[in-house]
Image (cartoon, rainbow, N blue to C red):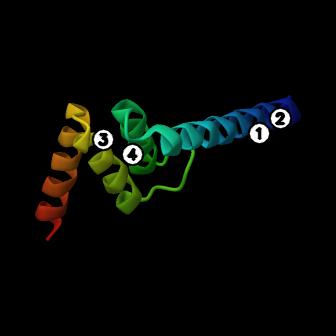
Amino acid sequence: SQQKELRRTNDVDAFADAFFSQQKELAMSSYRSNHYVMFCVGWCFDFGFGVEKDMNAAVKYYQFALEKGNARAAQNLGSYHLREHDNS
């Protein structure tokens, strides 16, 4: 049972790695036209989903999405800047 659970965890991790890899490739090839993909990549970096949490990368991808009109990216960037201001 424990071995089965470990295998299941590894399968989930492998799936997440593969999913993010595919999303990143898609995002990099179409970021100029697909603001939602850029937002999703930023969100992954923001919350550490499938990648190590990296706010610099999150901000970069949110900015790409914002430049194409993604309102949720604007909201997340605003929240990030508020958190940074409150911590200073």
Pointer 2: what residue? 7
- The residue type indicated by label 3 comes to Ala
- Tag 4 secondary structure: helix
The structure residue drawn at horizontal position 46% and vertical position 43%, both measured from the top left corner, is 44
- Give the CA distance from mark 1 to mark 3: 32 Å
**Image coordinates for residue 41, horizontal then vertical, percent:** 45, 42
What amino acid type should be assigned to the residue bearing mark 2?
Arg
Circle 1 is placed at which residue position? 10
Report the side of 49 relative to 39 (left or right): right
Q: Secondary structure at mark 3?
A: helix
On the image, the x and y values in percent for residue 38 come to 39, 40
In the image, residue 14 lies at what x, y percent? 73, 39
Of mark 2 and mark 3, the one earlier in the sequence is: 2
Residues tagged 4 and 3 counted as in contact (Cβ below 8 A): yes
- Kindly indicate whether the residue at mark 1 contacts the one at mark 2 (C-beta within 8 angstroms): yes
Viewer-side residue, 58 vs 11: 58
Q: Earlier in the sequence, mark 4 or mark 3?
A: 4
Write down the quadrant of residue 86 in the picture: bottom left
Q: Residue at x 68, y 38 (%)?
A: 18
In terms of secondary structure, where does tag 1 sit? helix
- The quarter of the rendered structure image containing the N terminus is top right
Q: Residue at x 38, y 49 (%)?
A: 46
Q: Tell me the mark number nearer the camera, choosing from 4 and 1.
A: 4
Q: Residues within 10 Å of mark 2 (few under 14, many from 20)?
A: few
Assess whether mark 3 and mark 1 are in contact (beta carbons under 8 angstroms): no
Q: Residue furthest bottom?
A: 88
Question: Which residue is disc 4 drawn over?
Answer: 42
Q: Amino acid at mark 1?
A: Asn
Residue 65, numbered label: 3
Classify residue 24 as left or right of residue 71: right
Q: CA distance from mark 2 to mark 1?
A: 5 Å
Seen at 24% across and 42% down, the residue is: 66
